Amino acid sequence: KAGVTQTPRYLIKTRGQQVTLSCSPISGHRSVSWYQQTPGQGLQFLFEYFSETQRNKGNFPGRFSGRQFSNSRSEMNVSTLELGDSALYLCASSLWRSTDTQYFGPGTRLTVL
Amino acid sequence: DQQVKQNSPSLSVQEGRISILNCDYTNSMFDYFLWYKKYPAEGPTFLISISSIKDKNEDGRFTVFLNKSAKHLSLHIVPSQPGDSAVYFCAASGGTDKLIFGTGTRLQVFP
């Protein structure tokens, strides 16, 4: 069974731009969660999608948004990029809930200049 | 407000010895705990979990201990191997449908 895939793997943007990251979950997994990883902060929960609906949201500003498609693929968007948005963005899929065992993709490394 | 804390950012252990990674939590609603391992350029992978109804769970060389009264859990790796060198994250859930991760501990196992 194919694992979680994320595209692109690396991205360089400048302040003020916007970016869209993509995640394809494991086949059959309905829950997709997004995390931001920065040095010293661990994995910070962004949001979780299930059946095309946002089911949970972390403490991030509205510049961070996401969506899920009918095939469970998910995208996250960050608008008006700031230097502090530079991070590794990880997507994880699980069968039903984000508290089930999650399977992570390799991440997208975003650098904001 | 860091509800899950890993106070040791790094740990260095000799091959063959025991590695002990610690994790503290503050939210008494947490009832399920997991450990993930992360290699560079890869996403975290699930290692082992424990429910709050147990105080110990073993899987091969990996054992997780839970002390609910102290709100503390630990991961023991015996014997440690060079391939165990990675960043280890503990995570907790309960009360809400979110998984809360700690900041990670980088384990280095040297020969």
Image (spheres, coloured by chain):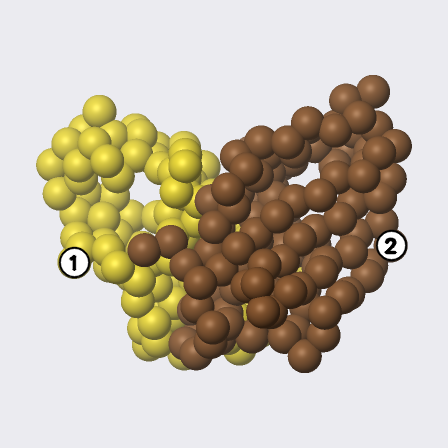
Chain colours: A yellow, B brown
Q: Is residue B27 above or below residue B22?
A: below
At horizontal 25% and vertical 43% (from top left) the residue drawn is A19
Mark-to-mark CA distance, 2 and 1: 44 Å
Q: Secondary structure at mark 2?
A: loop
The quadrant in which the N terminus of chain A is found is: bottom right
Three-letter amino acid code at the position of disc 1: Gly
Which residue occupies the extreme front position in the image?
Answer: B69
Q: Nearer the viewer, residue A22 or A61?
A: A61
**Local secondary structure at mark 1:** loop
Left or right placement of residue B99 versus residue B35 in this view? left
Same chain letter for marks 2 and 1: no
Tag 1 residue? A62
Residue A33 spot, x, y in % from top left: 43, 62
For residue A105, the mark is: none
Q: Chain of mark 1?
A: A
- In this view of the protein, which residue sits in the foreground, A82 or B93? B93
Residue at the farthest top position:
B111
* Residue at the image point whose x is 88% and y is 32% from the top: B16
Q: Label 2 amino acid?
A: Gly
Please rate how many residues cluster around mark 1, counting C-alpha atoms within 10 Å: few if below 14, some from 14 to 19, many from 20: few
The mark lying in front, picked from 2 and 1, is: 2
Which mark, by number, is residue B60? 2
* Residue drawn at 49 percent across, 60 percent down: B25
In the figure, is residue B81 to the left or right of A96? Answer: right
User: Residue B96: where, in percent of width, then height?
Assistant: 41, 76
Give percent across and percent down for residue B2: 38, 54
Residue A43 visible from this viewpoint? yes
